[in-house]
Amino acid sequence: MTVEAAAAGTADTAPGTPVLEVDGLSAFYGHVRALFDVSFTVAPGASVALVGANGAGKSTVARVVTGLVPAGGGTVRIDGADVTGHPPWDIARRGVTHVTEGRSVFSSLTVEENLVLTFRAELGAAAVPAALERVFGTFPRLGERRGQSAGTLSGGEQRMLALARALGAPQRLLVVDELSFGLAPVIVEQVYAALDDVRADGCALLLIEQHVDRALRAADHVVVLRKGAVVAAGTPAELSASLDELVLGPGPAEAG
Ligand code: ATP
């Protein structure tokens, strides 16, 4: 699907409907409140970077959107449908894939077995060869290591494999948490190049990144979270000059 086709909406979605709409979201871990009235949208085919300091609530937004953590209030809509409180499998069924922090691969299986297992479950056996070809085209390094146990891959290669498992089929929205964490710069560029391919297929991106500069280069919209609340949103051009202060908060003089 092209970006333009995606922007026109799915067959049963009105044109202009965001692929993701988060409205007044709150979330709690026990008695600790992690999110306060968080609202933003991701347009079809868009790339939105969610940035913020450690503990700002970025991963929590991703977990609530994908059904891993319940919303304490507010709504999550996917392609206009209210999915608040729906289980992760239902959100995945709607074309939302979450590449979580960490490596999330089956260590004792080979690279190819990891991919086949995922693609067979999600796409059916007939679609597996084409999905493998697509992924090995995007990540030639994984193709070279297709017979190697995933647990013996380098950290960067395991991150690639985790991403590759999400890329077998075109999606509506890919939520990627700390993609570049612990990766060498050259590998970071490879995984971001893979995300360009995903976008070219019309998939929207919600990027959670601590490397703010890198995320901004890949995003057309930025949402800044501080202490669980949205403190700014706009284009990278609009926000880049003031981003450090937005992320970290005002300096001591201004804070009074
Ligand atoms: P980082 O960049 O460090 O990963 P983040 O912006 O993704 O941070 P979250 O992981 O969403 O932030 O955490 C938001 C707040 O919720 C933090 O104060 C954190 O300590 C708390 N928190 C996160 N997960 C849990 C949990 N499982 N149990 C209790 N508190 C949690």
Image (cartoon, rainbow, N blue to C red):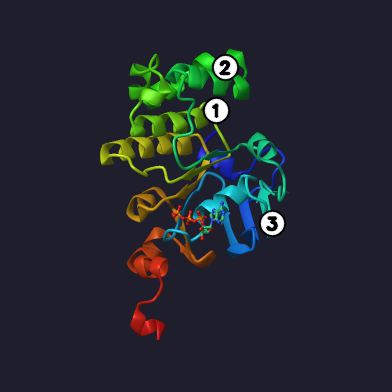
What secondary structure is found at the residue carrying circle 3? Answer: strand
Q: Is residue 19 visible?
A: no
Q: In the rendered image, which residue does mark 1 sit on?
A: 169
Q: Residue furthest front?
A: 30
What secondary structure is found at the residue carrying circle 1? Answer: loop
**Disc 1 residue type (three-letter):** Ala
Q: In the rendered image, which residue does mark 2 sit on?
A: 127
Q: Quadrant of the C terminus?
A: bottom left
Q: Nearer the viewer, residue 234 or 212?
A: 212
Q: Quadrant of the N terminus?
A: top right
Sequence-wise first label, 1 or 2: 2
Task: Tell me residue 221's x, y (percent).
Answer: 46, 56
Question: Cβ of disc 2 within 8 Å of ligand 1?
Answer: no
Nearer to us: label 2 or label 3: 3
Q: Nearer the viewer, residue 235 or 251?
A: 251
**Disc 2 residue type (three-letter):** Ala
Find the distance from the CA under tag 3 to the CA under tag 1: 27 Å
Question: Which corner quadrant of the image does residue 241 belong to?
Answer: bottom left
Question: Cβ of disc 3 within 8 Å of ligand 1?
Answer: no
Find the distance from the CA under tag 1 to the CA under tag 2: 9 Å
